[in-house]
Image (cartoon, rainbow, N blue to C red):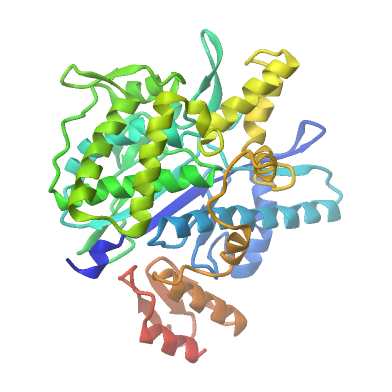
Amino acid sequence: MPLEYSRRIYGLENEYGVTCTLKGQRRLSPDEVSRYIFRRVVSWGRSSNVFLENGARLYLDVGSHPEYATPECDLIRDLVVHDKAGELILSKLVESAEDKLREEGIRGTIYLVKNNTDSAGNSYGCHENYLIKRTEDLNKYSEIIIPFLISRQIYSGAGKVINTAKGAVFTISQRAEHIWEGVSSATTRSRPIINTRDESHADAEKYRRLHVIVGDSNMSQFATFLKVGVMGLVLRVLEDRSQSFRDMTLDNPVRAIREISHDITLKKRVKLINSRELTALEIQNEYLDKVIKYADHNGLPEEEATILKLWMTTLRLLESDPMQLQDQVDWIAKYRLIEDYRTKKRISMSSPLVALIDIQYHDTNRDRGVFYKMERRGLVKTLVKFEEIESAIETPPSTTRALLRGNFVKQAKIKNRDFTVDWLHLKLNDQSQRTILLKDPFKSHDERVEKLIASL
């Protein structure tokens, strides 16, 4: 087995919500706020779509949503670090934007929230990327993976209070209400669970990118670690083919994802196409059993072995006492917070104060955000050190192509050279238009890049 197949490239893309208010009233439109935030970005590269010194991509997406795409990572822990680095990078841009507003005499506070829905009912995403071999059958993958993705919200959901015909209720997942298809090439028109647009960002003859767009944005480091890590374990078993998964095809995936999300007792059974009915926990345990059998026979890399143990423990606690996971699982942490506040204030779930907490949980401001207040009080666990997150603002992963891209961007900026970069290319915009194609995302050293940097 070639070395690169024992590793995998992972990536996360988070879209953020923005608003600017003064005494509870909206001061600027999301479009105006985003333009203030990205003024500094445009000054870096004359564009609102740039690649950074840490190898990541930062840009303004459709709907005026700032979006941060992590650099390529081959370890889930690195992915967690760089996902959190994205929060810090954007928070610093928000500070600069607020300074600019004050200079121009505009009063107001900018809020940058890492969630998936706004007050108007619009949804924006957290997209996961997994590099897989081109030889794999994506249609077959989708059939097997969709029940897994729909049921994993019980530990990866971010939680959301929604209004229904029966009143306001707490749900497990933010994205569940906005998914309309199982598989599609669209991302906004008809949001699917898996997006099939074929952009490998690598050697297209060898690889393709599995693009999952059903997940919630997580504040919890453990939720991100588990969400992406367990998906990686399932893919490892799929690629090996030594274990065959039982047919878990759901009768109606769109209905099932909502039914699971609406039941915080985790007892709801969803119907499979073969007429079986299973809970989300039972579906997850079906996948867990196959991964355990694979691990017993083949072993696992150290990080994946850790993820497997965490997955086992998490499912066991979800079955016995979900509230024991309030320091790791976002939806449980938020639910416990809201319930304690409701009891203290004697208010209903439909209270505007509850809606405010729901949003404030996702505030990325580390001084003001509710999640980070909980973190400082030791109410939620961390996986990585803050110093690592700060370092990742400027430092790319050392074991992937991101290192080449990040080093090139850094040195080109130092030498004040005009350049163009994307996931695959490094280009100097000089008379010779020197361009280097980087097709291997696992390759962190390349003499061509070293020579290009030396010539700057």
Q: Which quadrant would the N terminus be assigned to in this image?
A: bottom left
Q: Residue furthest top?
A: 166
In the shown orientation, is residue 333 left or right of residue 125?
right
- Residue at 21% across, 49% down: 296
- Residue at 19% across, 52% down: 239
Of the pair 330 and 60, the residue shown nearer to us: 330
Name above or below for residue 369 compared with residue 302. Answer: above
Q: Is residue 120 visible from the viewing direction of this image? A: no
**Where does the image place residue 155, in percent across and percent down from the top left?**
43, 34
Name above or below for residue 273 compared with residue 53. Answer: above
In the shown orientation, is residue 77 left or right of residue 417?
left
- Residue at 50% across, 69% down: 396
**Where does the image place residue 168, in percent across and percent down from the top left?**
57, 15
**Where does the image place residue 83, in percent across and percent down from the top left?**
52, 54
Name above or below for residue 67 compared with residue 223. Answer: below
In the shown orientation, is residue 410 left or right of residue 426?
right
Q: Is residue 151 visible from the viewing direction of this image? A: yes
**Where does the image place residue 434, in percent across and percent down from the top left?**
41, 84
- Location of residue 244 (image quadrant): top left
Q: How many marks?
A: 0
